[in-house]
Amino acid sequence: MNTPPSPPGAERTYGSSVRIGALVPLTRPGWVEAGQHLLAGLELAVREVNDAGGIVGRPLELVVRDTAADPQRAAAAVDELARLGVVALAGEYHSVVARAAAARADALGLPFLCSSAVLDGLTEQPTDWVARLAPAQSHGWRIYADFLLSAGHGRIAVAAEPSVYWASGARTLRDYLAPRGGTVIELDMRALAPTAVCDELVDNRATALLLLVGHPEPAVPIVKSVRRAQRLAEIMIGAPAGQPEFSEWATLLGDDGAAIPFLRYLPERLSPLGARVETALRERLAEAPSFVAFEGYDTGAVLAEVLRSHGADRERIAESWPRVAVEGTRGQIRFSRTPGISVWQWAWTPVQVVDRDPTEPGRFRILHTG
């Protein structure tokens, strides 16, 4: 019997593991805690698949590469993983890094299921090789802008660092708020010290300050400066990108880190599957899992179902995105073509605006849903 040729770059024999490449930030300047949660979710999903017999009797194997928030490192990792014979890529948290990985995966013909990056333009041109679980930035940040308006904020300052991701977020906020009477004032954090931000907020009569900056620097010093300025006692600090989600935020800021609303991609109430996964993730992480851990688990669950149904051929995996129907931890996952989005998109995961409760910073309050 003739054996069909393997996909390009594959080096597998019958009965060997089915390999998935996992891209995660595990060292600085990457957001290490996010990477750990993402990896924990992926690993849990893979363990459950293997406990249930693997992929048609073959074990599923994660081949992990640390991107360290470096786009060039991520692109090189995609090349290496393709040579190692992975059937698909999974993961990545940082949008700019995921964009580099997606471009390389598209060029190589390697399926990539992006877990957490939200940048609308994940690839320059429409591609069939890439699908995404996280909502597009324009979708989530419009919901955040809606929250700002409903909370009475019309003059919003954004402390921003230069990056495609932050610029895209600021543009989404401006485009949504301007027709509704809102004003966005941009503060260039290349030119301002955290203490100087306070003067700008007073001079511009801002009622809200949004942190479009890295964590912990300069986000943490900015929060401390604003919280200590008595003249800014009434100002709301917000962090749409989710910096307060992780425990490091609470450790570094304590009570100052509470009441800072951010975006989180979870339903108000978890399904039985979500609750079971939450328990397992909590045990694995030794702390409450973030939404990023659920994104990791759902990524593994989707890829496992695709592999069971369509086999381990790269082209067939990519062709299967529009036929996916998988019960994830946060709802049923299906991919479609969404206007303005260049990849196959789950439209949409649940979106919440939440903050840490000032009376109990370890607890989250849901402020708004969309």
Image: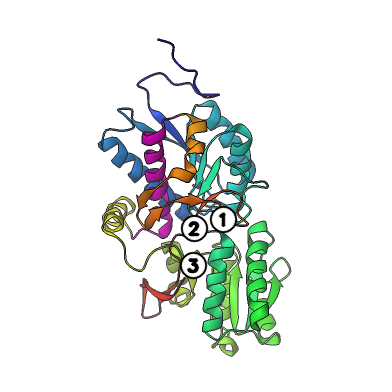
**Badge nearest the viewer, 2 or 3:** 2
Between the residue at mark 1 and the residue at mark 3, the CA separation in whole angstroms equals: 21 Å
Tell me what residue is drawn at x 35 percent, y 40 percent.
46
Look at the image and tell me whether residue 195 can be seen. no
Q: Is residue 266 left or right of residue 142?
A: left
Give the residue displayed 41% in from the left and 41% down from the top: 303
In this figure, which residue is indicated by the disc labeled 3? 263
Name the amino acid, label 2. Ala
What's drawn in magenta, residue-wise? Answer: 288-312
Q: Which mark is residue 347?
A: 2
Amino acid of disc 1: Thr
- Residue 199 falls left or right of residue 84: right
Q: Position of residue 53 (x, y in %)?
A: 27, 33
Give the answer, above or below, for where 241 lies relative to 181. above
Residue 55 vs 224, above or below: the answer is above
From the top left corner, tell me how far across and down residue 314 is, in percent.
Answer: 50, 31
| Magenta region, main secondary structure | helix
Q: What mark, if any, has residue 338 been given in the picture?
A: 1
Judge the density around disc 1: few (<14), some (14-19), many (≥20) Cα neighbours within 10 Å: few
